[in-house]
Image (cartoon, rainbow, N blue to C red):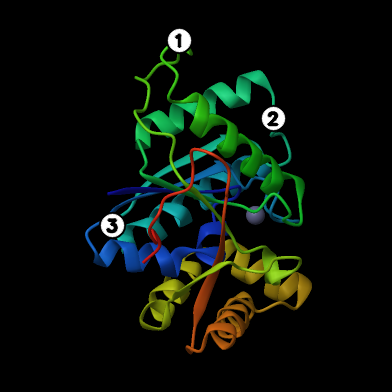
Amino acid sequence: MRVLAVGAHPDDLEFLCVGTLAKFKEKKVEIFMFYLCNGNKGHFEIPSPELAKIRKKEAEESAKILGAEIQGGIFPDLDIYPDKESRKKVVDLVRVARPDLVITHSPKDYMCDHTTTSKLLVDASFIATLPNYKTEHKPHALIPPIFFMDTLAGVNFLPTEYVDITDFIDIKEKMLLCHQSQYKWLKEHDGIDYVDFMRKVASFRGLQCGVPFAEGFRAYSVWGRIKPKRLLP
Ligand SMILES: [Zn+2]
């Protein structure tokens, strides 16, 4: 099995679904962690080109912990739109990963890079199967089921499926802490400790389903994407 998880920014997957990815990995599932924006505007002091390089390195360090394939940064932050050119680039990413299952942002998340990523993945994962839509890579054979991951802080999101990540909360924290540029900036600039933030959300989702820590998801329930069995670990 192959799972493609796509976040807008280099640290989004760590916040929202990496416990589930770690649980998949334990079941010998191949994991692709992609991010569409290079993270070049996520700081007030470090200039954009330098920041993009730092964030690429941080994302790679994190993915290494999981043994996941990592790719991304094909758009600058806040310069991602659901247009023809972007769609083609994302179709190619899907064709590289050839996923049996896709995880991405909720269409109701809090900012435009997240909602655009969601839209691009929904569209591209369908288009990627069409042989007459030509890109650099071969068409994918399957329209994959999609799960939307939690929104930031769980606002406006009621999960339909939960994954118990109690055994994976430490690896989630370790991977999140690879993103030191964000950890320091959020702490110093906004007074937010994002490890504490992440643990609170995981603990709240756990409370909802009766385990210490969980991640929540919603299935994208449209024709062609629904399967008659549970797919999340
Ligand atoms: Zn983000």
Q: CB atoms at circles 1 and 3 under 8 Å apart?
A: no
Q: Which residue lies furthest to the front in this view?
A: 228
Q: What residue type is labelled 2?
A: Pro
Precedes in sequence: disc 1 or disc 3: 3
- Secondary structure type for disc 2: loop
Residue 149 at what x, y percent from top left? 57, 59
Residue 49 at what x, y percent from top left? 61, 40
Q: What residue type is labelled 1?
A: Asn
Query: Badge 1 is on which residue?
Result: 132
Precedes in sequence: disc 2 or disc 1: 2
- Foreground residue among 63 and 44: 63
Q: Does the residue labelled 2 lie within 8 Å of ligand 1?
A: no
Please tell me whether mark 2 or mark 1 is closer to you in this view. Answer: 1
* Disc number placed over residue 82 in the picture, else none: 2
Residue 160 at what x, y percent from top left? 58, 66
Residue 21's quadrant in the figure?
bottom left
Q: Residue sitting at 40 percent across and 52 percent down?
A: 60
Q: CB atoms at circles 2 and 1 under 8 Å apart?
A: no
Query: Badge 3 is on which residue?
Result: 67
Could you classify mark 2 by the number of other residues whose Cα lies within 10 Å: few (under 14), some (14-19), or many (20 or more)?
A: some
Image position of 205 (left or right of 78): left
Q: From where the camera sits, is residue 40 visible?
A: yes
Residue 125 at what x, y percent from top left? 49, 33
Please tell me whether mark 3 or mark 2 is closer to you in this view. Answer: 2
User: Against 145, is 194 above or below?
Assistant: below
Question: Within the displayed image, which quadrant is ligand 1 positioned in?
Answer: bottom right
- Foreground residue among 65 and 214: 214
